[in-house]
Amino acid sequence: MARKKVTVVGAGNVGATTAQRIHGLGYADVVLVDVVEDLPQGKGLDMLESGPVLGSDAQIAGSNGYEATAGSDLAIVTAGIARRPGMSRDDLLLTNMKIIGDVTRSVVEHSPDCVLMVVTNPLDAMVQHAYEVSGFPRHQVFGMAGVLDTARFRTFIALELDVSVEDIQAVVLGSHGDDMVPLVRYTSVGGIPLTELLPDEKIEQLVQRTRQGGGEIVQLLKAGSAYYAPSAAVCQMAEAVLLDKKRILPCSVYLDGEYGIQGLYVGVPVKLGANGIEEIVQVDLTQAEKDALNLSANNVKELLEVMKNAA
Ligand code: APR
């Protein structure tokens, strides 16, 4: 059986680590694209030369153009600028909007049937822009944020309880920003509700640390933003698509009335498989959770307004 084909646009920290992880899995060929001359070619060749050691026969090559990306099954967009200390994700808006528009047009032209995953921040607004530019149906365009946010929440819970990260299940809703909504009621440890294991104040501290998880890394790195955990999250979602796993994961998706939200990209749990978003999973929310989700969605709306005025 022919290997699947994945395009990764942006050969910076997130794109290169994502390409490395996918190439290492061995069952998908990767094309790494960047505007910087020779950079994706150099990183791609370096990764290809890791194949014999890793036992991966997958192909990987870099390119400054899109011809080599033709016929991709999955395209992952990480191109753009990253945050520096003092910047919010929203500060990246207009620069990254232009990049996402250009990249989406080129990807779609060469891979009209691909599933498109956006990683560039501010995430939900960037996916919405990619969706509008692509002309794709909504199930083919989604964003990575919730898997990363839940991974951070799960990490902090595991550290607090001194238990395996594998036993922790969590759901985070909303936009990928400081107003994200970790759903504590749906968070469990080996099937036991988190609320049975930790006092409310401690849970609230972990929720706050999760909300600011990206900023915590930016403060430490000083010259860029997180990429190890983000690329691991992208890779898990890529696997769900490439292997048609139908995983239930939180992703940024276009809501058309689901959760009472109309015409906006926001993070909610979905079923992710070969066709992209195969189902939007709706769970009951309390009034407080609904209010928090709406607040978070309003932030995306405000960014879209700014983008509309700048267009
Ligand atoms: N086409 C292709 N690549 C581009 C383009 C473009 N039009 N514009 C910029 N790039 C490339 C840059 O040359 C750079 O190599 O995108 C890459 C971005 O890499 P980094 O600066 O290392 O940023 P990174 O940490 O990878 O983050 C990328 O993902 O998580 C988000 O907030 C983060 O929006 C940021 C994005």
Image (cartoon, rainbow, N blue to C red):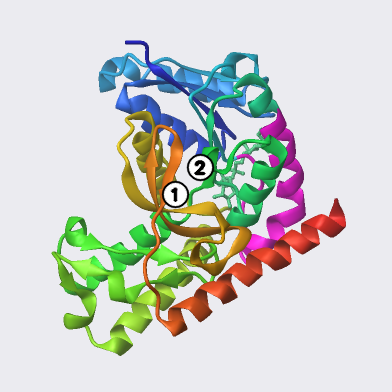
| Residue 13 in view of the camera | no
* Towards the viewer: 259 or 156: 259
Q: Is residue 107 left or right of residue 188?
A: right
State how far apart marks 1 and 2 are (Cα): 7 Å
- Asked if the beta carbon under badge 1 is closer than 8 A to the nearest atom of ligand 1, the reply is yes
- Asked if the beta carbon under badge 2 is closer than 8 A to the nearest atom of ligand 1, the reply is yes
Q: Is residue 270 magenta?
A: no
| Residue 22 in view of the camera | yes
Name above or below for residue 59 compared with residue 290.
Answer: above
Name above or below for residue 196 compared with residue 167.
Answer: below
Q: Is residue 4 left or right of residue 123?
A: left
Residue extending furthest toward the front: 257
Name above or below for residue 47 compared with residue 144.
Answer: above
| Start-end of magenta stretch | 79-105
Q: Which residue is mark 2?
A: 14
Q: Is residue 100 magenta?
A: yes
Image quadrant assignment for residue 262: bottom right
Q: Which residue is mark 1?
A: 230
Q: Secondary structure at mark 1?
A: helix
* Towards the viewer: 253 or 100: 253
Q: Residues within 10 Å of mark 2 (few under 14, many from 20)?
A: many
Residue 104's spot in the image, x, y percent?
A: 67, 34
Q: Residue at x 56, y 61 (%)?
A: 257
Residue 294's spot in the image, x, y percent?
A: 56, 74
* Towards the viewer: 192 or 258: 258
> Which secondary structure dominates the residues rendered in magenta?
helix
Q: Residue at x 52, y 41 (%)?
A: 139
Q: Amino acid at mark 1?
A: Pro
Asked if labels 2 and 1 touch by Cβ distance under 8 angstroms, the answer is: yes
